[in-house]
Structures are given as structure tokens and as C-alpha cells.
Amino acid sequence: MDLSYTDEQQAFREEVRSWLGANAPAQALQSFDTELGFEQHREWEATLNKGRWGMVTWPEALGGRGCDLIEWLIFEEEYYKAGAPLRVNQNGIFLLGPTLMEYGTEEQKARILPKMANGEEVWAQGWSEPNAGSDMAAIRSTAKLEGDKYIINGQKTWSTRAVWADWCFGMFRTDPDSERHRGLTFILVPLDSPGITVRPIPQLDGLPGFAEIFFDNVEVSVDNRLGDEGAGWSVAMATAGFERGLMLRSPARFQETARRLVELYKENRESAETDPAVKEAVMRAYMDAESYCLTTYQTACRLNKGGKIGAESSTNKIFWSELDQNMHAAAMSILGARAELLPHAPNAKGVGNWLDGWLFSQSGPIYAGTNEVQRNIIAERMLGMPRK
Amino acid sequence: MDFTFTEDQLLFQDSVRDFLVNEITPERIRASWESESGRDSALWSQLAELGLTGMTVPEAYGGLGMSELDFVLLAQECGYVALPEPLVHSALVAVPLLVDIGGELADQWLPKVATGEAKVVAGLEQNLLVEDAHVADLLLLQQGDSLVAATADAVSLIHNESVDPSRKLFAVSVAGAAAVVANGDQAQSLIQSSLDRGALGAAAQALGLAQRMIDLSVQYTSDRKQFGQAIGAFQAVKHHMANVAVCLEYAKAPVHRAAYSIACKESVASHAVSQAKLNACEAANLAAKNCIQVHGAMGYTWEVDLHIYMKKAWAMANSWGDAGFHKTRVANHIFTDGAALGAGATFA
């Protein structure tokens, strides 16, 4: 065990810091759930890509830097410290990209990955359906192969970024007689295809962060199938797999929130101290973010040395999503009567963007597999409790 | 950056676990409750033969010269079996304290500790009472601003019974000759580092205790049937256990970081230890709470083994600094102006 960074890691950190210092937007961008903000974030993706900072864990040949997990953690630390924008194309870069590298044909990789990397094509995910949420194997949307085209019919929902995205990826039932996780195929669909209707769904903040997608005889070239027909479930499981789960939320994000929370407490000490529970909550936020960082580093180091990641990583999503809620709840308590005010309200001095974070934190225990589903996975696969 | 244990450290952990799980069975612990001292000198000799009593004793004194980082995984295993013998106390607190005191006292006692001939315990005022004073040959005791050394014949003991029948706690008063081994700042620094090491030992044991309570409960809820199925198949029961697993999973790395911090004398050691102690004892306390619940009425009995581990977990939570003590230390760190917090600060 050696908990110090190597000279190379320090140099990498310096390089990230100095590039972000020179290139990160000085002014916060608009929310990427607005039309203007979406395009601003798309431009930021292009800027990142020019500096080869867009996908640091991707191989060098694909425009990445081939970073290992420790370098990724360092990159993320500098990224959040710099207050750089959220990633509008995260569904593509972090979820679909690595899956394409594993299952895609050379033609698909060459056609799709460069445009994903430079933000030219932003990706939405199309997992859920009205009757297939936590129970993803209940998917009903169909894709019927006719010649060299799939004809897609059905409906996807809760499709993040779909309002302004260019493509979506998801699973469709290609074998009409199949049940559950058999007979599903992973298909990539251009969102400007005839027959597609995208209906924005306003989120808690009123902005259309996700959407429903209706497919009415949508024709998609068979070139856009990822993996074999009928193999969709295993391709999707790779996308949603344990290691990908580790990279969904880096500790840096929560450590920066915890640091800002400590500052908020100090700025409002007089009112914050009237409720002793608030100080405890702030301490807990700091400690939990620290635990999350330590645990992630320990896992990353183990994986770097060839270790395997297992079902214990299902604890990860529960931990960070509850941490995020708890931290923002503490901030709401500190802000007191100001907590409900939108940032532009005349009397909202000093509220920062805590309200936005609080609203978003409500989604954490739900998306990417509800925490109830995660708890079942932990109990059955990690602890070995009986399924029946 | 390498936050992993070596192959050797992991192999040693495995072999110690095998030994302890085979030897320190719940039956043996129950038998120890019936004996007068509650301690087993034959077992202590076995631990010595395995090199465990001398693990942290410097090689010059016949030990293995290993660090807190080498010992922390073994302390987890001691927790897993609720080892009644004061091995963690000796290896993590008393031995390093003797090494730091040095001089004739170290020369005289450390070789005997390594061979298992002698036991040394430390009594700090942060702990109300002294563990295992009745089997100690030498006691290192905080007396206000000083640290004194007294042999067994120079102290008188008053036994205080604990809810955990394995714990032997004593009020110690020095009746005969005691040598002052440190005063003032030097004593304060020794007391501080002993407290940190004791808290690390309690935290590591709490991790093992939590794991043991999980294992017992998974077994019990797989076997026990109600409404025509194993109760462990009910989601409400699963989620009790999953919550413990989450809490425990995120307590491990802080404990390992704390062990590293102490071994490498990092400046963050004190609050790293406090966080580790808080995290690990929270996991063990949650394990106790949820595991008794999924055991149902059986969990409330003396007959089921759960309470062996549960009671030790409760005791660990308030030993070597209670939650209030450790929270205060963490608070002092994070609320100090200019504290290094946020992304990138953890290993800076």
C-alpha cells in the first residue's frame, strides 16, 4: 500500500488543471435541458475533444488517452474542482461508447465513435418503456427485420436528453414469440427518422430533461444493430455492468458538494447552529463523501492490478444517491426560509444552485435501477440470500 | 497510488482467519464465560506460536517488526470470531506504546511479549476501565498528565461486569510501586497515539463483527421458514441485510486508510482514525440492530450465538473514544478555516 501519487500521476493532474484553467468556461453554461444550453454543452464537448480531454479512458487511437481508473479519478477531481460543465453526451461517452468498443463492428466504430467524441452526435438512452421500468425484461417495443431494415414500433420513456439528442440506443423485441430477456436486440436509432415522435417530459425543475419516444413504422438500417439479433440483453448488461456502474458517479462530484456545504454552513453559522442536527448532517456529508472516495480508490486500485469487480459494487449506487440527497437536504436546512426560492427571486441572496441540486438529488435513488432493485441484487448476489 | 494489500498480507489474513474460525468457536467462547478468568493461557500460547503476539514487536526483541497496516486485517479477523483474548489490545496499543517508551522497560518486557510469556495492557482515562488487567503482567496507566508503569503485584483491581460476558473490565488503582515513564507533552503524545491505535483496533474489530452478524443472519434467514418459504426471500428481510452490507462496504476503506495513516505517521492520522472508528462502529451497530430483527424472537435469546458478536459490537462503539469524542475530532478538522477539503484533498 502506498497512498501517494506517482510523479506521472502528479504531472497528469497538473496537465489537466492547466488545460481546464485555460479552457473551462468562465461563466456557467445554461442548463443542458434548454435548447440554448444544449448547444452550449455540445460546443463544450467539441472543445474538450480538441484537447483530447473528452474521453480520457478511451483508447488513444479513438481520441482518448487510455487512462487507467486512477488517472480517471484524478481527471474527475480536477474537472469538478474547476467547476467545468456537466457532460451532455454522458450516455454516449460513458455507456454506449465502451459497449460499442466491445460489441461494435469496425464499420460501426469508425462511423459512430468520432462523432460521439466531438459532440456532433449526442446520444439519448432508450431503456424504459411504460410497462418496463425496473422490470426491463418486460420490453414490448418491436423491431421486425425486413430486408436490410428493421421496422420499429412501440414506445420508450424516461429517455434522458432525448429532446435535443441526435440518436438513441435501446433494446427492442425482434422475436415476437419471445419472453423476458430472450429475443431482444440492441439497436441504435437516428432520432430524425421518419415515424419518430419525441414528446418532452418536464422534470421537477420544469425543464424537459427527458422525453417519451414514439416509434411508428420507423425504418432503421440493419447496420445499426449492435451485437447479434437476440443478444440484446447481454449487450445491455455490459452497458449497465458493474464496472460501468463504478464510473457513473465519480467521488469528486460529491466531495466538491461536501466542501461547498461546509462553506455554506460557515457562512450561515448563526442560523445553522440553531438546529444541532444540521452540524451533524454537514459532518456526515463530509465523511460519507470521504468514504465514497476512499472506497472508490480502493476498488480502482484493485481493478488496476487485475482484480475483478463483483456484486459488492451494487452498494455503490445506493451509497452515492443517498449521500447526494442527504447533502442537499442539509443545505436546504441551512438556507431555511430561503431554501424554496428560485435563484433569481429578489430575496434569494446566497442560495446558489442548491435548490437545483436538491431537485436533481431526488432522481438518484430512482434512475439506473431503483435502490430497491439494487438492494435485492445486494441481498441475493452479494450476500447469497434466497431468491425464493 | 496503490490502495491494496500485498499478497503476503492477504495470505496471512487467510491463514489467521482459518485458525481463528476453527479454534474460537461460539462453543469455546461460551465455555470461557464459565471459567473464572474468562481467558485461556493455552490459547495465548498458540497465538504466540503463530507469531501473533510478537507481530508488532520489533525484530530486535524477537518479534516480527510489523506495522499497524500489517495487523489491521488480522484485527478484523479477531473481531469476526469475537476473540476474548487481548491480542488486538496488545499488538496495536500496548506493544507500540512500550516501543515508544523504550529504554529498560521495553528491553525487559518486549521479548517476553513476543514469546507470549507476558501480557501488557494499557489503561487510558478515555476508557473508564482497563480491559484484561487481571491477566496483565505489566500495566501502562495514564494518571492525569503522566504515564506510569506498574507490575501486576503493584495494583489492586475491582472487577466491573460488562453486558458482554467476554469482556473483563477493571478499575485499577496503584497500590505499590509504580514508575513514572512519561510526563507532560511526552505523556500527552503517547496517550494520544495509544488512543488512536486503540480506536483503530476497535474499528477493525467492528468490521469483522459486522461481517459475522451478517453471515449468521444470512444463514438463519435461509433456514428459517414461515408462510411456506425461507424468510430471507422476503424483500423486507433482504433490505434490512442489504442496508447493513452497504454501510459495512463503505466503512472498510476508511479503516484501511486509518491503519496506513498511523503506520506512515501521516498528519491526517487522528481524524482519519476518528472517521474510521465512526464508520466501522456505525456499521456494526446497524448490523446488530438489523440482525436481531431478522432473527425474530430467537435474536433476543441467550441461546442463539448472535449476541456474542452483538454485545461486543456495542462495547466497541464506546471504547477508545465514544462517538461524541470522535465526531468532535472530525468536526475540528472540517470546520477549521483553511482545512483541505473537497475533490483531490483526500490523499494530498
Image (cartoon, rainbow, N blue to C red):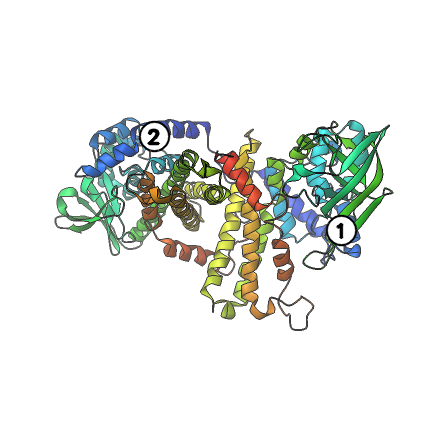
Residue at image coords 69%, 68%:
A344
Tag 1 subunit: A
- Identify which residue, A367 or A111, lies in the foreground: A367
Check disc 1: other Cα within 10 Å, few if <14, some if 14-19, many if 20+: many
Both on one chain, marks 2 and 1? no
Q: Position of residue B98 (x, y in %)?
A: 27, 41
Residue sitting at 79 percent across and 31 percent down?
Answer: A108
Vertical comparison of B9 with A364: above or below: above
Q: Is residue B3 visible?
A: no
Q: Secondary structure at mark 1?
A: helix
- Residue B127 seen in the current view: yes
Residue lying furthest bottom: A347
Subunit bearing disc 2: B
Task: Residue at 77%, 27% (x, y): give it.
Answer: A105
Q: Is residue A73 above or below residue A274?
A: above
Looking at the picture, tell me which residue is in the foreground, A61 or A157.
A157
Can you say whether A53 is above or below A353 in the image? above
Q: Dividing the picture into quarters, in which one does residue B12 lie? A: top left
Q: Element type at marker 2?
A: helix
Q: Nearer the viewer, residue B44 or B231?
A: B231
Residue B129 % position (x, y): 24, 50
Tell me the kind of residue under disc 1.
Answer: His
Q: Looking at the rendered structure, which numbered label has been put on residue B264? A: none
Q: What residue is disc 1 on?
A: A41
Q: Quadrant of residue B64?
A: top left
Residue A174 to residue A93: above or below: above
Residue in the foreground of this view, choosing between A117 and B225: B225
